[in-house]
C-alpha cells in the first residue's frame, strides 16, 4: 500500500482538498441533483484533517493490516446464522473489551454495544456493523485463500464491517483522540433476510437510550454513501383447504390452484405501479405445498418481497398484492364443485420502511466531505440497510464503506480482497469526528 494514497501532510491538504472537492461536485450531481458539498463543510473538513492527532489516526490505520486480517479470519470462522448470532456476539464483545472499552454489554435483542465516552456527553453517535450473515447453521465458513483474496461465506458482508469498527477504536486510542460526544460502537443483529432489522429496531424502540446520529458500516465501495432507504414489505401467504385424493376428491377447491391464480393476477396488475414513477420491484421468491402428485394439497404457500424507495409506491404495490390474493381466493372458491371453501393466511414477515434522504443534512454533507478529503468522489445512493429505520424516524443516518473489495455476496464463494482497505476506517474516522466533535 502506498502511503501517498492518504492525505497525511497538513501543508498540502488545502490544495488536494480543493481539487478533490471540485471533482466530486460533477459526480455528485450525476448521482443526486444538487448534491454538492457546502463550503462550510469543506472548511470544517480542512480544519479537521489539519489536526496532527487526526493525521496520526489516519496513518495508524496503514500499520495494522496484518492484525486486522488475522482478526477478520478469526471472526469469520465463528458462524452467525440468522437469529443465532450469540456466539459471534459474545466473541465480538470480548474484542471490544480488549480495545479498552469499559462499558460493553449485550442488550435484549442481542446487539453488542460498547461506549467510548465523550467529554461532554450531550450527544451520542453510533457507529455500527451487523453481526449476522445470511447463511444457515451448518454452513462451512472456513476461510480459504485464492492469491490475496480471502474466500468464505460472510467474510465481506458483513464480518469485515465489524473489523472496521475495531480499527477505528484502535486508531482513536493510538492517536490520543477524544470526542466531545459519546461514541457507541455497535455490532447489531438482524440485518439480513427475515431478521427484519430487529437489532436497530430495538436500538430505536420507544424508551431506548438516546442515539442522535447513526453511521452504519456495510458495503465495500469507498465512494458509496447510502443516505436514503429502499423500503420493503415481505409476506408469507398460505392458502388452506381440506385436501384429498386427486381422483376421488376431484371438485374440492385446490390451494395450489388458488396460489397460481394469485401469482398470475399479481404479475398482471403490478405494472400499474412498477411502470411509472420511482423504481418499485416485486418478487415471488419461494413457493411450496402439497404432499404428492396425486393429492389435492391441504395448503400451498408463497413468500413475496416488494421494494421501493418511496413509501407511497410501496403501499401501492402492496395493495395490488392484497387484491390479487382475495380475488384468487374468491375465484377458486366459486369454481369448486364440492366441499368447504378455502381460507388464506396473509402474514407480514418483514417490514423495512422506505426513507427519503436529505443530501443537504449535516451528516450527509460531512460524509461526503470525509470521502472527498481522502481523494474519493462520493456517490449518494439509496439501498436497504440498517439506516432505513433511523432515517424513517427523522434521525440522521448514513451507511458507509467497510473498506477493501468484495464479491459474490450471499453466496458460498463470497470473497474479500485487501485493496484500498484503509479507506473504510479512514472515512469512518473523519465522519465520526466531524459529527461527534474533536475534543481539545
Image (spheres, grey):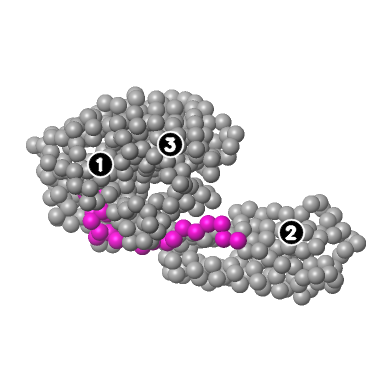
For marks 1 and 2 on the same chain, the one whose residue lies earlier in the sequence = 1
Is 221 magenta? The answer is no
Are dots 2 and 3 in contact, CB under 8 Å? no
Front position among marks 1 and 3: 1
Residue that numbered label 2 is attached to:
299
For marks 1 and 3 on the same chain, the one whose residue lies earlier in the sequence = 1
Instruction: Tell me the residue at 53%/43% (across/down).
Output: 82
Q: Is residue 249 left or right of residue 89?
A: right
Disc 2, SS? strand
Q: Which mark is residue 159?
A: 3
Instruction: Tell me the residue at 44%/61% (across/down).
Output: 353
Q: Which mark is residue 117?
A: 1
* 252 shown above or below 295: below
Where does the magenta region start and end?
347-373
Q: What is the distance, in whole Å, between disc 2 and disc 3 at their CAs?
A: 39 Å
Is 358 magenta? The answer is yes
- Residue 178 vs residue 300, the one in the foreground: 178
Confirm whether residue 258 shows in the render: yes
Q: Mark 1 packing: few (<14 Cα in 10 Å), some, or many (20+)?
A: some
Amino acid at each position: 500500500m502506498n502511503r501517498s494514497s492518504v492525505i497525511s501532510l497538513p501543508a498540502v491538504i488545502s490544495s488536494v482538498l480543493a481539487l478533490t472537492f471540485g471533482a466530486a461536485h460533477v459526480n455528485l450531481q450525476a448521482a443526486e441533483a444538487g448534491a454538492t458539498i457546502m463550503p462550510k463543510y469543506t472548511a470544517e473538513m480542512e480544519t479537521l484533517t489539519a489536526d496532527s492527532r487526526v493525521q496520526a489516526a489516519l496513518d495508524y490505520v496503514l500499520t495494522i493490516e496484518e492484525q486486522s486480517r488475522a482478526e477478520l479470519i478469526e471472526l469469520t470462522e465463528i458462524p452467525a446464522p440468522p437469529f443465532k448470532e450469540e456466539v459471534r456476539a459474545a466473541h465480538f464483545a470480548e474484542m471490544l473489551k480488549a480495545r479498552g472499552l469499559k462499558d460493553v454489554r449485550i442488550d435484549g435483542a442481542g446487539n453488542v454495544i460498547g461506549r467510548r465516552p465523550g467529554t461532554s456527553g450531550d450527544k451520542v453517535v453510533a457507529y455500527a456493523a451487523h453481526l449476522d450473515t445470511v447463511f444457515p447453521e451448518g454452513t462451512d465458513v472456513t476461510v480459504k485463500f485464492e492469491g490475496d483474496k480471502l474466500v468464505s461465506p460472510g467474510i465481506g458482508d458483513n464480518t469485515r464491517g465489524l473489523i472496521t469498527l475495531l480499527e477505528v477504536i484502535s486508531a482513536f486510542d493510538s492517536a490520543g483522540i477524544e470526542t466531545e460526544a459519546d461514541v457507541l460502537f455497535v455490532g447489531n443483529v438482524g440485518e439480513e433476510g427475515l431478521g427484519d432489522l430487529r437489532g436497530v429496531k430495538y436500538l430505536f424502540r420507544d424508551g431506548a437510550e438516546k442515539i442522535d446520529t447513526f453511521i452504519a458500516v456495510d458495503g465495500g465501495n469507498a465512494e458509496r454513501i447510502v443516505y436514503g432507504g429502499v423500503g420493503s414489505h415481505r409476506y408469507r401467504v398460505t392458502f388452506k383447504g381440506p385436501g384429498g385424493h386427486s381422483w376421488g376428491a376431484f371438485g374440492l377447491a385446490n390451494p395450489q390452484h388458488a396460489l397460481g391464480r394469485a401469482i398470475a393476477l399479481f404479475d398482471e396488475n403490478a405494472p400499474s405501479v412498477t411502470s411509472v414513477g420511482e423504481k418499485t420491484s416485486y418478487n415471488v421468491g419461494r413457493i411450496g405445498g402439497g404432499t404428492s402428485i396425486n393429492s389435492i394439497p391441504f395448503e400451498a404457500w408463497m413468500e413475496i418481497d416488494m421494494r421501493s424507495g418511496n413509501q407511497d409506491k410501496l403501499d401501492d404495490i402492496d395493495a395490488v398484492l392484497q387484491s390479487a390474493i382475495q380475488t384468487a381466493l374468491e375465484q377458486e372458491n366459486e369454481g369448486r364443485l364440492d366441499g368447504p371453501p378455502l381460507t388464506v393466511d396473509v402474514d407480514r414477515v418483514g417490514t423495512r420502511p422506505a426513507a427519503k434522504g436529505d443530501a443537504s443534512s449535516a451528516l450527509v454533507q460531512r460524509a461526503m466531505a470525509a470521502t472527498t478529503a481522502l481523494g474519493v468522489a462520493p456517490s449518494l445512493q439509496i439501498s436497504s440497510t440498517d439506516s432505513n429505520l433511523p432515517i424513517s424516524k427523522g434521525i440522521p443516518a448514513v451507511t458507509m464503506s467497510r473498506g477493501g473489495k468484495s464479491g459474490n455476496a450471499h453466496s458460498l464463494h463470497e470473497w474479500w480482497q485487501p485493496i484500498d482497505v484503509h479507506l473504510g476506517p479512514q472515512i469512518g474516522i473523519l465522519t465520526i469526528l466531524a459529527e461527534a466533535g474533536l475534543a481539545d
